[in-house]
Image (cartoon, rainbow, N blue to C red):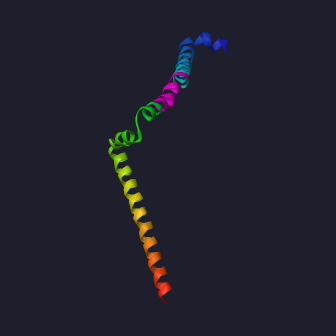
Amino acid sequence: NSKNRTQCPEAFLAVVAEKLAYTSVMFIQVELMNEFVFQLPRLVDSRLGVKIGPESMEKFAKENPSVGRHLTLMERRMKLEEVWEKLNYLVRRQEEAKARRW
């Protein structure tokens, strides 16, 4: 209402200033930060993946203690699964040999 604006311009200007501040924050977040937030990690990943080999990438990942522990656990699990498969194979062969004898 134009009559209310002339009676209390400070309140009207405060609302306009708040709306402008909100709009500018949204612009900064959407237009400027979007590029940084979404493109920078992909750029870093692509550069790291291309310039270093798998061994160097694993060494780099192990520099982070939690990632290093996780990678070590994954390696141990893979080795244990391999041993488990070989033991199962040997048990099956032994059972087959016993079955042939009888």
Which one is nearer the viewer's eye here, 36 or 102? 102
Which one is nearer the viewer's eye here, 39 or 76? 76
When asked about the image quadrant of residue 76, the answer is bottom left
Determine the residue positioned at 52% across, 25% down.
Answer: 35
Q: What residue range appears in magenta?
A: 31-44
**Principal secondary structure, stretch drawn in magenta:** helix
Determine the residue positioned at 45% across, 33% down.
Answer: 50
Compared with 67, 35 (above or below) is above
Residue farthest to the right, as pictured? 1
The total number of labels drawn is 0
Compared with 19, 65 (above or below) is below
In the rendered image, residue 26, in percent from the top left (x then y), is placed at 55, 24
In the rendered image, residue 34, in percent from the top left (x then y), is placed at 53, 27
Say if the magenta span includes residue 35: yes
Say if the magenta span includes residue 39: yes
Image-based side of 63 in relation to 102, left or right? left
Image-based side of 13 in relation to 88, left or right? right
In the rendered image, residue 21, in percent from the top left (x then y), is placed at 52, 19
Residue farthest to the bottom, as pictured? 102
Determine the residue positioned at 34% across, 44% down.
Answer: 62
